[in-house]
Image (cartoon, rainbow, N blue to C red):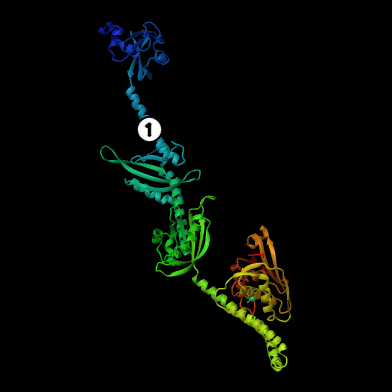
Amino acid sequence: MTAISFSTNTEFDRLTPRAWLEAILVPAIVLDEAGILLAHNTHVEDLLQHHAAPTLGKAIEGPFRIMADRVRRVAGLETRAWFEQPIGNAWYRIAAYPLRARPDGPVMQAIIATDITKQKHAEFEIRESEGQLEEATRIAQLGTYKSIWDTGAAHWSPNMYIIHGLTPGSPLTGRDRYGELVHPDDRHLYERYAAIQSEGKALNGAEYRIVRKDGSMRWLRLDARVLFDADGQSYATFGTCQDITEGKQREQELRNLLRRNAILYEALDASPIGVAVVTTDSPRPEVFYVNAEFVRLTGYKASSLTKRSIGALIPGDDASQWDMVLEALHTSGGGAFELTCARRDGTTFLGQIEVAPVRDHPGRDATVFVLNLRDITLDRQRSAALLQSQKMEALGQLSGGVAHEINNLLQPVLALSDLGRDIADKDPVKVRKYFEVISSSARKARDIVRQVLTFARRDTPEVAAYPIAGLVRDALRLLQSGLPPGIKLVEHIDAGAVEAVVNPTQVSQVVLNLVKNAADALDGEGDVTVELTCVDIDAANAAALTVSPGQWIKLRIADDGEGMDSYTLSRVFEPFFTTKVAGKGTGLGLSVVYSIVNGWGGALKMESEVDKGTTAMIYIPVVATP
Ligand code: ADP
Ligand code: MG
């Protein structure tokens, strides 16, 4: 564009520059080619009111300091030029127009300032909201795209590229190339989504996977709408594409978690033991969960137990039993109990209950407990029967010895009563002596018979504190005569008068079973050692024996017979486990010994080696050392 030329012979020619500048309603100045201010209008003064007033004939640097450089850059140009400039609180568009007074005259500059503050603010606002939108879509991992149907052109937002692992603006060549990005397993899906869009239909929450060039897999979600032009003609698809990989992963984790939970619940329901989870945050322990077996055992539904609290299992008014359980729940120590529980229908069963705290933080008091419930009514009956049958077996073994003992005692009774009858008149002193022997023998026989009767009795054995040494000696004496003649008992009974809380019949049952096994292992020929001593068990040994450290009575019964291999040794305490021929062994001996010793609060250990022999050690708690 060339400079505007004024014709010299017009009215306009006679106007002073100042006069025509005043006709312009915005600030305007005229500069000569050297940048000297030739004229300005009053609007310039308004604009520069806080600055030094413009001075005609002076360079523009002074008053227009802030924009002088830029003015100079546009001044002297043969073309129109403009720039935007903030002055005070306002924005101006400063435009320079080349101006020639005469066609061959020098180029002056008319400089006009237009207030563009409003546009500028609007522009800022738009830029800001665009920036925020961009940021929001970036945060939401949301890309947008537009496909123009006519041309097949696709416009992607920068985020769209980022989501696909591409450099923003890199060329896309049609759907074929996009298809390459789609996960092979999801290509059929994507084909369908593309078809729906090309039919001009909306797409809602269409999900598929892509594989980025770096090999990473992402889940995407597409939502698309059809765009219509002013005539109501659909012409394009506008869509959003969101990277939902994280959400998908969380969804998958949640699904795995739910599956794990479901499996755990299934497993708990398959358990043959009743399981209840109880929380104690509230004043009354509350049932949080019960498994199927718990429901079956108690007859209460899970929901009604939850409402009722675990105390519903108390039979009648007897709440005292549950005190132990509740105590364990509160002190968070856990414990095991046997107690009579009530079913919903009022019937009762003997329950074995174990309470264990569930700690989510080590060291912190538990408020959640797991409670295992088992119906041991039948077990109890069975083991009572088992005990009885073993007793009868032991009784059978004893009877030989008993018969022998009683026979021995009957000898003097018979002989002396015959003798006494003959000399009754002649020697009353002698006869009196005979009677004493007879009565003492008969009394001894009565004691033996009594023992056998106690032994055979069915009721639960009463325990009391006894000097253990005497009981062991009695037992050995009683069983001695029942042993094969080749078996010699080697006794070391050194426990003095130490007492233990036991039942005498059970002591003889234990001794009898162990000595009998030893005699069997020796095949009727050899020594069986029976030792009774007091021992101090230190912490290290106590742990191995599963007893507490301190004073114990130790009963040791050893043989150097055939011994056992480790497999046999591992099974000896099982009821009915025997290696003996039918009629010789029942396999009950050691299991009975085990349960008796357990009942005393003692421990039992067995060591054996094939062809070397076997040692049984029994540890019995000491109650008193008089
Ligand atoms: P039983 O004597 O009726 O077989 P027990 O319970 O008393 O039943 O013993 C189980 C098994 O343990 C025996 O059959 C035997 O194999 C083994 N056993 C027990 N004591 C000894 C021992 N002192 N020496 C070798 N084996 C033994
Ligand atoms: Mg036996």
Establish whether ligand 1 lies closer than 8 Å to the Cβ of label 1.
no
> What residue appears at the point 41 percent right and 10 percent down from the top-left corner?
62
**Image quadrant for the N terminus?**
top left
Compared with 619, 278 (above or below) is above
How dense is the environment of label 1, judged by Cα within 10 Å: few (below 14), some, or many (20 and up)?
A: few
Task: Name the spot of residue 496 as percent of width and height, x first.
Answer: 70, 68
Q: Which residue is mark 1?
A: 130
Residue at disc 1, secondary structure: helix
Q: Position of residue 280 (x, y in %)?
A: 46, 54
Residue 435 vs 176, above or below: the answer is below
Residue type at the position of mark 1: Glu
Query: Quarter of the image holding residue 426?
Result: bottom right
| Residue sitting nearer the eye, 103 or 164 | 164
- Residue 322: x %, y % from top left: 47, 62
Whether residue 583 can be seen here: no
The front one of 4 and 606 is 606
Q: Position of 398 compared to 263: left or right?
A: right
Looking at the rendered image, the quarter that the C terminus falls into is: bottom right
Please, is residue 51 above or below residue 240 in the view? above
Please report the residue visible at 38 percent of the width from the left and 30 percent of the height from the top.
Answer: 128
Q: Quadrant of ligand 2?
A: bottom right
> Is residue 253 visible to the viewer in this orientation of the structure?
yes
